[in-house]
Image (cartoon, rainbow, N blue to C red):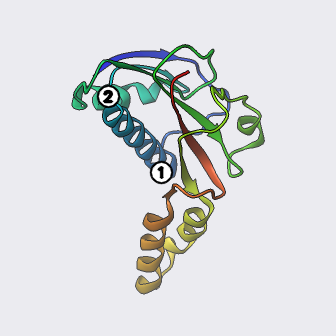
Amino acid sequence: MELEVQLNPLPGFPALEGAHELAWSYLLDALFADAYHAGVGRLEVVLPHPDLREGVGLRARLTPSSGDKTGLALLAPAPSGKADRVYTLEFGLLAPARLRRTKPTRPGKEPEGSLYVYTLRAKLAGLGMRSPNPAWADRAWRAVRQHFASTQSTPSFYRLLTWGAS
């Protein structure tokens, strides 16, 4: 897939480690999978942190071009442009207030799809992962995996929205 990356650093963006590193893996995998299935051949991505460049570049190299449509992924605040497929990122209730105040781009009335990542249920289940009781820790790990991302509306840190043509 042809790729163009822009960087628009976002103050207060969390360090890409632990749950946030996993969250971005989910977000980028979902974005590139949707772009492939939608026939996107050229994708422009605006990133909020320089450490995300490598993951985006890797996914672009591994994702074959499946059409001649254009995609625009506004993962950091940036002016919207014209594209056949648009992806925007919003910060949910679990994000700090300074990130929630970031004004997301909404290129349409209703998104075609949403993915809520690093949900409240996963965060709460994560507390049990440090339990000295192995059975409790195993249950907590499983609960984190089951509830880390959801297509259903739920309190979360990140929300990836998918839109049709802008």
Q: Amino acid at mark 1?
A: Gly
Amino acid on which disc 2 is placed: Gly
Q: How many marks?
A: 2
Residue at position x 72%, y 44% in the image: 96
- Check disc 2 and report the residue beneath it: 39
Nearest the eye: 133 or 85: 85
The x, y position of residue 103, in whole percent, is 73, 28
Task: Estimate the x, y position of residue 158 in percent, counting from the top left.
Answer: 59, 45
The crowd level at tag 2 (other Cα within 10 Å; few <14, some 14-19, many 20+) is: some
Disc 1 marks which residue? 18
Residue at (37% x, 41% y) in the render: 29
Residue at x-position 56% and y-position 21%: 166
Q: Quadrant of residue 80?
A: top right
Left/right of residue 131 with respect to residue 98 in the rendered view: left
Describe residue 134's horizontal placement relative to residue 164 as left or right: left
Dividing the image into 4 quarters, which one contains the N terminus? top left
